[in-house]
Image (cartoon, grey):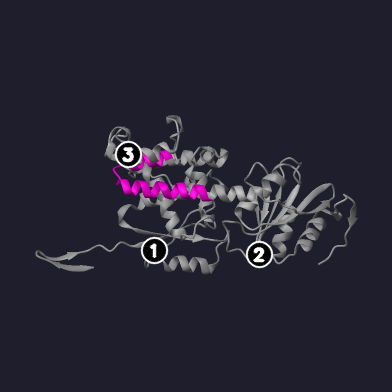
C-alpha cells in the first residue's frame, strides 16, 4: 500500500494473513504448539485462529480455512487431519518444528517438555489451581466464543515470554498500594512450592512482575476463579446424580448402556461405573445421540479392533478408535471435542447386536432379580 509523506512516497507493508487451525476445544499442548507458529512468524504475519470440529476434515472445512488466508497463503494445521501428533510425537507442541534461532525458543522448548510430560502422566493437571486442567473444562461452563476463550488461555502461555523486571514480587506484600492484589493472592493459600507452571498462582505472579495494571490482573484472575467455581459446582452436581444404566451380559461381561446430559455427567458415570469395575464395558450416549464405547481397566480388555472396523464399515467417518491411553482403548462416535461428527444412526439395541455379532456371543438383559432372560436380536 502506498501513502504520501513530507519526503515523498512511503511504502506501507500490509501483513499477509494465515489461518492456524487447531482442534475444537483445544487442551494445553495445542496452545503451546500455536505459540511456536506465532514465534516463527513474528510480527510480519497476521495469524487467525480457526477450530476443527471433526477428526477428519472435509473439503468444505479446508475451503473455509483457505478463505481466511490472504491470496497465496496456506492454512497451518496443528493436530488436524494428517498432522496428528500421536503418529510419532509426544504432544502437538512436540510436533511443531523447533527453530532454535527464534527469540524465546529456549523457553518454548522447556514448555514442550512440560506438555510431553503432561501427555504421558497428567502432571500439569494434578497441581492445585491447575490452569491446564481448567482449560479442558471451562468450555462447558461459559457462553463465550471459542476464539475469545482461546486468547484468554493463550495469555497464560504468553506469560512465560514476558519480561519479569517491571516490579519486584515482594511489592505485593510490602506496598499498601497493592492491598487488593495481596488479598487476592492470599486467597490461593499456597506455599512457594505450589507456584508451578500452568497454575493460577504462577500466572498471577507473571502478570504482576511484568507490570500489568492492577485492574487487568484482578479481572483476569477473578475470571479464572469464577470459571473454577462453575466447574466445581457442575462436577459436584454430576457426582450427586444417581445413574441407572440398562444392564446387559455380553458373554461374561457386564455392559451398561446409559444416556447422559453433559461432559460432567459423562465423567461422573465413567468414574462410578466403569472406573470402579462395576461394568466391564459401557456404551455412553450423549444428548445429541453420539456414542462412546469404553472399557474398564479393572477387567481384562477385549480387543476392540474388530468392533471398530465393523462400525467404520457401517458408518464411514463417524467412528474413531482411540488407542493412546494406557488405561484402556475406546471407540468414539465424535466426542466433546469433535462435535461436528454426525451421531450414529444405530439404536442401542442395534449397537448391542453389532457388538454381539462381532464377538460371536449371546446378548441378554439383566433383570432386577438378577434373572437373565435371553432377548432376540432386533434391528
Element carrying mark 3: helix
Residue 343, numbered circle: 2
Q: Is residue 241 above or below residue 195?
A: below
Name the residue at 45% across, 30% down: 193
Element carrying mark 1: loop
Q: Quadrant of residue 174?
A: top left
Q: Which comes before the other along the chain, label 3 or label 1?
A: 1
Q: Which residues are magenta?
A: 201-230
Q: Which comes before the other along the chain, label 3 or label 2?
A: 3
Q: Nearer the viewer, mark 3 or mark 2?
A: 3
Q: Nearer the viewer, mark 1 or mark 2?
A: 2
Element carrying mark 2: loop
Given residues 186 and 196, the one toward you in this image is: 186
- Magenta span: predominant SS is helix
Given residues 342 and 146, the one toward you in this image is: 146
Q: Is residue 85 visible?
A: no
Name the residue at 65% across, 64% down: 343
Q: Residue 228 in the image: state x and y as whole percent.
A: 50, 47
Residue 179, numbered circle: 3
Q: Is residue 173 above or below residue 23?
A: above
Query: How dense is the environment of label 1, judged by Cα within 10 Å: few (below 14), some, or many (20 and up)?
Result: some
Q: Is residue 211 magenta?
A: yes
Query: How dense is the environment of label 3, judged by Cα within 10 Å: few (below 14), some, or many (20 and up)?
Result: some
Is 143 on the left or on the right of 17, as rendered?
right
Name the residue at 35% across, 53% down: 41
Q: Quadrant of residue 286?
A: bottom right
Residue 73, numbered circle: 1
Q: Residue 84 in the image: state x and y as whole percent.
A: 54, 52
Is 152 on the left or on the right of 177, as rendered?
right
Q: Is residue 236 visible?
A: yes
Amino acid at each position: 500500500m502506498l501513502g504520501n509523506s513530507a519526503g515523498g512516497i512511503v511504502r506501507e507493508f500490509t501483513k499477509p494473513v494465515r489461518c492456524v487451525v487447531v482442534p475444537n476445544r483445544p487442551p494445553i499442548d495445542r496452545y503451546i504448539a500455536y505459540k511456536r507458529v506465532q514465534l516463527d512468524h513474528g510480527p510480519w504475519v497476521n495469524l487467525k485462529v480457526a477450530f476443527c470440529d471433526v477428526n477428519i476434515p472435509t473439503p468444505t472445512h479446508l475451503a473455509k480455512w483457505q478463505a481466511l488466508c490472504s491470496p497465496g497463503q496456506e492454512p497451518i494445521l496443528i493436530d488436524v487431519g494428517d498432522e496428528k501428533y500421536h503418529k510419532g510425537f509426544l504432544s502437538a507442541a512436540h510436533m511443531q518444528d523447533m527453530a532454535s534461532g527464534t527469540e524465546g525458543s529456549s523457553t518454548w522448548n522447556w514448555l514442550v517438555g512440560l506438555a510431553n510430560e503432561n501427555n504421558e502422566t497428567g502432571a500439569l493437571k494434578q497441581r492445585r489451581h491447575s490452569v491446564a486442567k481448567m482449560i479442558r473444562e471451562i468450555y462447558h461452563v461459559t457462553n463465550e466464543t471459542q476464539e475469545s476463550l482461546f486468547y484468554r488461555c493463550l495469555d497464560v502461555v504468553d506469560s512465560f515470554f514476558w519480561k519479569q523486571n517491571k516490579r519486584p514480587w515482594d511489592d505485593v506484600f510490602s506496598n499498601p498500594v497493592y492491598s487488593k492484589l495481596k488479598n487476592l493472592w492470599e486467597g490461593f493459600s499456597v506455599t512457594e512450592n505450589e507456584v508451578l507452571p500452568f497454575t493460577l498462582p504462577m500466572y498471577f505472579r507473571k502478570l504482576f512482575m511484568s507490570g500489568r495494571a492492577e485492574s487487568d490482573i484482578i479481572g483476569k484472575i477473578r475470571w479464572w476463579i469464577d470459571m473454577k467455581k462453575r466447574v466445581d459446582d457442575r462436577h459436584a452436581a454430576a457426582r450427586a446424580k444417581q445413574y441407572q444404566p440398562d444392564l446387559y451380559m455380553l458373554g461374561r461381561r457386564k455392559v451398561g448402556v446409559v444416556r447422559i446430559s453433559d461432559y460432567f455427567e459423562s465423567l461422573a458415570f465413567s468414574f462410578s461405573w466403569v472406573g470402579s469395575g462395576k461394568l466391564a464395558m459401557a456404551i455412553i450416549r450423549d444428548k445429541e445421540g453420539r456414542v462412546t464405547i469404553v472399557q474398564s481397566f479393572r477387567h481384562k480388555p477385549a480387543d476392540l479392533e474388530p468392533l471398530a472396523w465393523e462400525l467404520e464399515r457401517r458408518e464411514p467417518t463417524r467412528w474413531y478408535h482411540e488407542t493412546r491411553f494406557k488405561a484402556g482403548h475406546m471407540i468414539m462416535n465424535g466426542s466433546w471435542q469433535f462435535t461436528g461428527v454426525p451421531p450414529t444412526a444405530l439404536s442401542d439395541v442395534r449397537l448391542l447386536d453389532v457388538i454381539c455379532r462381532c464377538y460371536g456371543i449371546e446378548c441378554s438383559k439383566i433383570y432386577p432379580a438378577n434373572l437373565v432372560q435371553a432377548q432376540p436380536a432386533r434391528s
